[in-house]
Amino acid sequence: MKLYFTPGSCGLAAQISLREVGASFDLVKVDFGTKHTVEGDYMQVNPKGFIPSLKLGGGEIITENAVILQWIADAHPGAKLLPPAGTMERYRALEWLNYVATDLHKGMAVMFSGFIDGASKVRFAEGNLAARFEYVDAHLALNDYVLGDTFSAVDGYLYNVLRWPVRVNVDISDYTAIQAFMRRMEERPSVIAALESEGAAAKYQP
Ligand SMILES: N[C@@H](CCC(=O)N[C@@H](CS)C(=O)NCC(=O)O)C(=O)O
């Protein structure tokens, strides 16, 4: 199995889950600018040009973070990374996965965009993102992990995305439940190893 990723971006979530289930995988680094890897043209792997992609042993390629995370969970049911398919708990987990993928991940992507000027980004952060962080913070004030008491695939994705605000000058240091969540996540061997493999700072700095 191969995980195509770029350090510091949204491939961290899949890597955390792969490590949580004890999967054996290789990391293939994608150059954002050239869309190339050591193997050649990344567009042949994922014509959308996005990371992450997960290439399975049989050659099938899965794209889209929220789908990759579901595949990892479903292929390793013993790890209980997501509730079983068909249950109401699974739909609750999917609500969160979708929220992280759309409102948070793609919301944060606005802040990295080269097409949007600085003043617009500030307005967007204050007028849109702040409410998303407040919602997550209020939820985490009542729950150690997104789905309750135990870690799930959603947590790795949320952790991944919440490492980004500081990089775009969005201050989330006052969200105390989010800060506690980040520290909790950084105690997990999967997170420590994934950060190390990306050459990322081991600790999230608010
Ligand atoms: N819909 C995709 C989006 C993934 C995505 O936005 N990936 C970003 C990194 S976090 C990317 O590959 N950006 C490359 C680029 O914009 O050139 C998913 O949910 O997996």
Image (cartoon, rainbow, N blue to C red):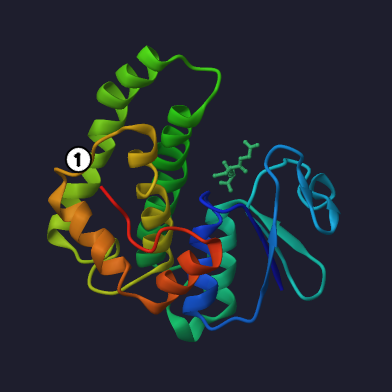
* Count of number-bearing discs: 1
Residue type at tag 1 = Glu
At 29% from the left and 51% from the top, the residue drawn is 205
Q: Position of residue 154 (x, y in %)?
A: 40, 61
Q: Position of residue 201 (x, y in %)?
A: 41, 58
Q: Please tell me which residue lies in front, 87 or 189.
A: 189
Q: Is residue 204 left or right of residue 98?
A: left
Ligand 1, image quadrant it occupies: top right
Q: Please tell me which residue lies in front, 175 or 104.
A: 175
* Residue 78 appears in view: yes
Q: Is residue 76 above or below residue 166?
A: below
* Residue 83 appears in view: no
Q: Is residue 200 left or right of residue 26?
A: left
Q: Is residue 43 above or below residue 83?
A: above
Q: Position of residue 112 (x, y in %)?
A: 48, 31
- Mark 1 sits near ligand 1, with its Cβ under 8 Å away: no
Residue annotated with mark 1 = 134
At 47% from the left and 36% from the top, the residue drawn is 106
